Amino acid sequence: MTSPTLPTILLVDDEEHSLSSMRMALEDDFDCLTASNADEAWALLDDNYVQVIFCDQRMPGKTGVTFLTDVRERWPDIVRIIITGYTEANDMVAAINDAGIYQFLTKPWHPDQLLLAARNAVRLFQLSRDHERMSLEMRYLGDTVESKVEKRRRALREGLGFENVLRAPNSPLNAVVETARQYASFDVPTLLVGEAGTGKTAMARAMHYTSLRSDRPFYEINCVGLPETLLEVELFGAKRGVLPGVATNKIGLVQKADRGTLFLNGVDSLSPRMQIALLRLVREGAYQTVGGHETLNSSVRLLTGSHRDLRTEVAEGRFRSDLYFAFSVAEITVPPLRARPGDIAVIAQHMLFDAASAHGKPVHGIDDPALEFLEGYDWPGNLRELENEVTRMLIFAQDRVLGPDLISRHILQAIPSDAGADRSADDAIASEGTLKDRVELMEMRILRETLTRMKWNKSRAAAELGLSRVGLRAKLERYGVTPPRKSANSNEEE
């Protein structure tokens, strides 16, 4: 086994017996080098890793303080100790200022005193090196952590930007996204108008993470259905004791989102009192907490969403015109899902894989005939309704590829058209036309829905409908009902 390396100490004294005495006192614990003058000591310093110097003050040539001053400039980490028989105050002050002396030892010294001073000096040297090393490591780690945080922020911005707004390459939503991207870089209030579930929150979030505020927080709240008092507390916060059972101050979203972005969805449902409070916030950046009297300020950027056309609401006296114009420095209309059927395949497949991952049920996708039915329906509930339907299909799926037999009946009964499908069979009942025409419309839908559920097995479909196979075939020919697209799942058994 290799013995540990001893710390190296340099002893400098022009008296031989003093050098021998110091060596004898220290050599068991340290590797001792000796020099009789400053020049010899300097040569030893060039060739050895010295940690501590014991130096006599009065030597021919350079004094101890002069020599240690030069050492300090070249090797500042070496711990420097003066041994002297004189303790004049001026000399001590000069030594501390010029040479950075760690300790004075007076002659005659005791061996234990010398040994203790040496051990403390070596420990100081090691601590100094450890501190330097840790400082470098912390600086490196700080840079590394900062770099990782910046990478995570960049990834977050990219993952929550407009790339997260799902759409087909030729989608009508592309023009909307380009407009929103243009507005995002300008720090102005923006109003997003569209039916519930069209993706206004995703659009607002994308605008935030593409803006100059992307490093600041993003918050959103849906105002629809919230009581006025609760909404006021959520937005502006409340003083301690105002809320029952809450003994601390509540911080509101306006304060949390300061220098960031706050998206208020459903502003068309705001009460007159909340409209006044928000008008002050938009115009002046000022607000008051519930129960407080102090006026606070926030530099939050407000993005708002409305399910209805606010111009109509203004005209009918339900919404303040000044607040509408304050909200709508920029205005974006988000189209409903029925206006962009080409996006449904992209969105439905994405929703399916998300649901499959969340529920641990692997799938390969949705087949083309099923996508035709989904694209033909007009989705009054927009993205939320589509997500619910895809999740339900996943739950009942037996194969890795989901077919049209899993789709809900009211969607299967809907008739595809360029403008989107009718919403339900109830429309046929309420539609205009003769009784015969309306009954035939419903009959055609039922035939199509039943055959789809039966995977176009005509024998099973005829049995469920109480028809003969010949009768079923005749009705299909009469109404022109055919499979939406030939697939491996089709089974036209006669």
Image: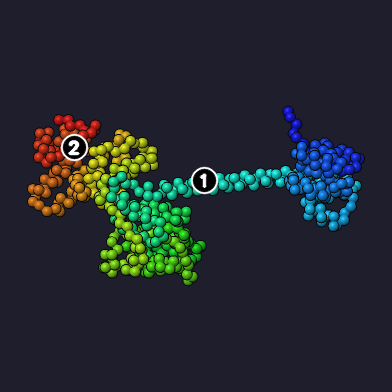
Q: Position of residue 145 (x, y in %)?
A: 55, 46
Q: Are marks 1 and 2 in contact (CB under 8 Å)?
A: no
Check the image and report above or below for 222 versus 390: below
* Residue type, mark 1 in image: Lys
Q: Which residue is depicted at the point 83% across and 42% down?
A: 39
* Residue type, mark 2 in image: Pro
* Crowding at mark 2 (Cα within 10 Å: few <14, some 14-19, many 20+): some
Q: Secondary structure at mark 2?
A: loop
Image quarter in which the N terminus is found: top right
**Residue in front for this viewpoint, 63 or 385:** 63
Check the image and report above or below for 285 versus 393: below
Q: In the rendering, which numbered label is found on residue 483?
A: 2
Q: Position of residue 242 (x, y in %)?
A: 46, 66
Left or right for 483, reference 107? left
Q: Which residue is depicted at the point 75% across and 39% down?
A: 49
**Residue in front for this viewpoint, 106 or 264:** 106
How far is disc 1 from disc 2 in space, using C-alphas?
54 Å
Left or right for 157, reference 42? left
Name the image quarter holding residue 469: top left
Most extreme residue toward the bottom is: 293
Name the image quarter holding residue 41: top right
Image quarter in which the C terminus is found: top left
Check the image and report above or below for 224 versus 315: above
Q: Position of residue 358 (x, y in %)?
A: 39, 42
Q: Position of residue 486 (x, y in %)?
A: 21, 34
Q: In the rendering, which numbered label is found on residue 148?
A: 1
Q: Which residue is depicted at the point 39% across and 54% down?
A: 207
Left or right for 297, reference 164? right
